[in-house]
Every structure is written in structure tokens, then in C-alpha cells.
Amino acid sequence: MAVYGNKMNLHIKYGLVALFFLLAACSSEQSTAPAKVPHGYYATLRIVEDGRQLHIGPFVGYYFKPANPNDFSRMDFICLNERQFYTKDLPDGARIYEGEAIQTTLPREIPLPAAEGDRLRPIFDKQIPATWWATRPQPQEEFVHFHSCYDAAGPVHTGYWLRHRAVAAFTYDMGGRVGPESILYHRVNPGADRDFARIVEFDWGPGKSAKEE
């Protein structure tokens, strides 16, 4: 785990199958890295904000690199196809995405969604509040996926909008476990993945369940 310090400026489900695999993607206990992770990239980051610790990660295959040790407003990330978790088209450990993560605090006048018992609580597509959706960085059509940070009590309004740029062509099929009926399933070509699932995710952290809160 990397530790850095800085001061940050800070439901409608689309089918049980899609939700199950979305939640599984955040299972840190299953996350391994068969491929070499570049120097400076981390699966988990701990951020100190005015004496409060916030965390981001880990997610299967995702590794983050801060712009610099004192600036978490922007991070680079890579996504590896660990255990062919995201696609059966490419081998275990292949790099499938590179991208940017831009720190954002969602408007707090809308409360966080109620706990449901899983680590991750997703809000899908048209159920995302307009004021939250409007916080996407430019180019907004490429920043379509938000993942919250979390502290000791659970998810917070602060997190990152992610911009995924594919480095290979493949079908995003969760290793063959989902099909076209899933919000996650889509064909990916090299370049900005504007079809990446539009989801705002609130994270209780690894090894925790919202039931515990």
C-alpha cells in the first residue's frame, strides 16, 4: 500500500447477472497480478486529508499512479486482464486499458445511497442524479464511470471519474460470464471506450459489507 499526504479539494438494477459480476470486480481477496505491474503503480492508495484517511482500491486488475506524491487530483491507471476476468479474448494479465482518474467530490446535497449488504453499491445510467453526472471532467463523453473513495465508516462523496482508453480490441464479457443482456457487455476497439458502463459506484472497502455499517 502506498501512503501519501495532501489536502483534497474536495438504483435501478439492470439484472442480477450484471450486478453480480460488477460486485465481483471489486473483490480484493481474489486480486492477483500475474503480469508485471509498472513501477509507481499501486492497487491501493491511502490518502491523508486533514487528518482523515481515505482509500481507493483495490479492484481486480486496476493499478493507479498519482501525478506526484503530493497531488491526488489526477492519477494515471492501467487495467490488466487478470485471470481473464474482463475478457476471454485476451490472455491472463494482458493490459487492456490505460487511462486517467480525475478526483471529484459529488454534490453533497444528495445523500449517499442506503446500504444493501454488499461491498459495492452501484447506481446505473439514467438513475444517476443529474447534478452528479454533470461533474464529469472534459471530455465528458469519455469520463463515464465514477468510483468513490472510502474511509473507516464506508463510502464518501469524494472519488474519481475514470476515462478508459483501450489498448487492444476485445469483447468486454467478464471472461465469457455475461452476454449482450448485461449493461457491462460491449465490443471494445483501441482508443477511448465511450461504451464503458455508465455507473456511479460507492465502495465500503475490501473485506467489508454494508451490512456491517
Image: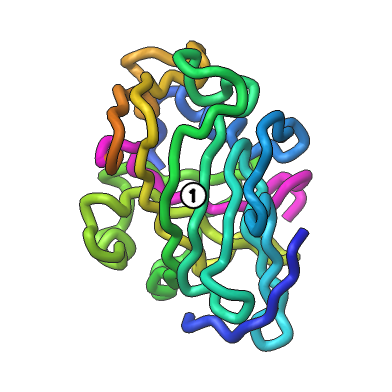
140 lies above or below 32: below
Q: Is residue 191 visible?
A: yes
Magenta region: 194-213
Q: Report the residue marked by disc 1.
A: 201
**Does residue 140 sit above or below 189 in this rendering?**
below
Secondary structure category for the residue under label 1: strand
Residue 204 visible (yes or no): no
Judged left or right of residue 181, residue 62 is right
Q: Residues within 10 Å of mark 1 (few under 14, many from 20)?
A: many
Task: Please state which of residues 90 and 5 is positioned toward the viewer in this rendering.
Answer: 90
Residue 5 percent location from the top left of the image:
68, 80
| The quarter of the displayed image where residue 161 is located | bottom left
* Residue at (48% x, 20% y) in the render: 87
x, y percent for residue 127? 31, 47
Under mark 1, the amino acid is Glu
Left or right: residue 41 versus residue 1 is left
Quarter occupied by the N terminus:
bottom right
Residue at image point 74% right, 31% down: 30
What colour scheme has been applied to the protein in the rendered image? rainbow
Residue 51 found in image quarter: bottom right
Question: Is residue 127 on the magenta stretch?
Answer: no
Examine the rendered structure and indicate whether residue 35 appears above or below residue 160. Answer: above
Q: Is 212 inside the magenta-drawn segment?
A: yes
